[in-house]
Amino acid sequence: LFAAVNAVVPPYAIAPIILFVGLAMNQDAFACTPEQQIPAAVLGLFPPVADWIVSKWPHGATPPPELAAIAHGALLVGLLWTSIAVQIIERKFKHAAVWAMIAAALSAIGLIHQPQADLTFKSFTQGVGGFGTSPCAFAIGYSSQALAFGLLALAQANGSPRVPAPRLDKDDLVDAEELGQSMGRVRSESAVMSGAISPAEQQVQEDVQSATESNECQHAGP
């Protein structure tokens, strides 16, 4: 089917359409991305751009092995880099460590940063540009990141003043507040059904809760 389309429609007529669709998709993606996470989205574009540069490299010349290593598995590499960067920005170092461990595992088997996967590990320490572009080198790099993020997460869990707490978005705060209110209502209903409190006491609790919510709304208002 694609061969038939290429035979009927010249490539230079399809290229502007593909470019327009790609730009529209990127525009929508950046519009939906929170402002503080935009650097992570930009970082995720580096591997696909490297892949495009390698594909357009002059014939007869070999692209730098370091650039080719970034280009191999560009979609997965971009996804992993973006995920790690987002967790760093949100100061969720435990999640960042998990993503770094996934990247280390994928790079160890050559699924990313290598021309082809190698489940036998015969080329584990060999790369096109030497050891620096080998699966072992990338696995060590991502594992070092995972270790560093794990130490930061441990310090964060112990309340270290040098490691700030995870960032909470407004949506997270609203969800937590709604969850707390729902849990309070469920507990009250369970207590009424079990006979722990009387319906009159239940009504008093609901009146107090309603009054509290009204006061919070008034304080939050202009």
Image (cartoon, rainbow, N blue to C red):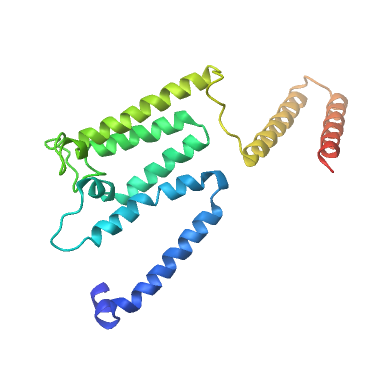
Q: Is residue 60 above or below residue 39?
A: below
Q: What residue lies at 37% left-to-right and 29% top-to-bottom?
A: 146
Foreground of the two, 211 or 70? 70
Picture coordinates of residue 135 (x, y %)?
21, 37
Total tally of numbered discs in the picture = 0
Q: In which quarter of the image is residue 114?
A: top left
- Image-based side of 66 in relation to 177, left or right: left
Q: Which quarter of the figure is the N terminus placed in?
A: bottom left
Rendering quarter of residue 128: top left
Quadrant in which the C terminus is drawn: top right
* Residue closest to the eye, 192 or 147: 147
Residue drawn at 34 percent across, 54 percent down: 48
* Position of residue 17 measured from the top left corner of the image (x, y, whole percent): 40, 73
Image quarter of residue 149: top left
Q: Where is residue 92 in the image (x, y as percent from the top left)?
A: 50, 31
**On the picture, is 162 further left or further right than 61?**
right
- Seen from the viewer's position, the closer of residues 198 and 207 is 207
Seen at 52% across and 24% down, the residue is 163
Residue 43 locus on image (x, y percent): 41, 47
Q: Residue placed farthest to the bottom in the image?
A: 8
Residue at x 20%, y 47% (from the top left corner) = 65
Q: Which of 78 and 49 is in front in this view?
A: 49
Classify residue 161 as left or right of residue 201.
left
